Amino acid sequence: MKYLVSALGYEYFNDLKIENSQVQHFISYVLAGGFERRSILKYGFVSDADLMRFQRAVLTRILSYKTPLTQK
């Protein structure tokens, strides 16, 4: 998670309207959404391809993250 923040920077997340205090939570949210990270955990390295996949996952998950849950 720290690598993703350092590689992308807080500005990347701020452009998505995510506050600095919520960046770690948002990254966890994206990773928990089915993001394949087996090779990252196995080798302890995030490749450029992994970083691009993460950015695509961010774009697909950002709307559901920002949408408030409705109460029934």
Image (tube, grey):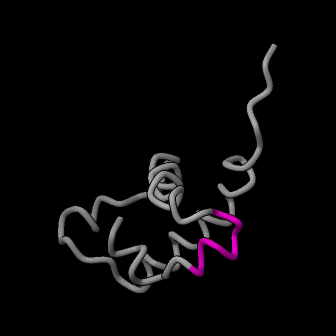
Residue located farthest toward the top when viewing the structure as drawn = 72
68 with respect to 22 (left or right): right
Quarter in which the C terminus is drawn = top right
The answer to which quarter of the image holds residue 44 is bottom left
Residue located farthest toward the left when viewing the structure as drawn = 43
Name the one closer to the observer, 27 or 18: 18
Look at 39% across and 81% down and name the residue there: 6
Percent of width and height locating residue 10: 52, 77
Percent of width and height locating residue 46: 32, 77
Give the answer, above or below, for where 56 lies relative to 37.
Answer: below
Look at 51% across and 58% down and name the residue there: 21
Name the one closer to the observer, 54 or 9: 9
61 with respect to 26 (left or right): right
Quarter in which the N terminus is drawn = bottom left
- Examine the residues drawn in magenta and state their main secondary structure: helix
Look at 76% across and 38% down and name the residue there: 68
Name the one closer to the observer, 37 or 31: 31
Percent of width and height locating residue 7: 41, 84
The answer to which quarter of the image holds residue 13 is bottom right
Name the one closer to the observer, 56 or 16: 16
Give the answer, above or below, for where 70 lies relative to 61.
Answer: above
Look at 24% across and 77% down and name the residue there: 45
Indicate yes or no whether the magenta region holds residue 57.
no
Percent of width and height locating residue 59: 68, 66
Give the answer, above or below, for where 64 lies relative to 8.
Answer: above
Total count of labels: 0
Write the start and end of the magenta stretch as one range: 11-18
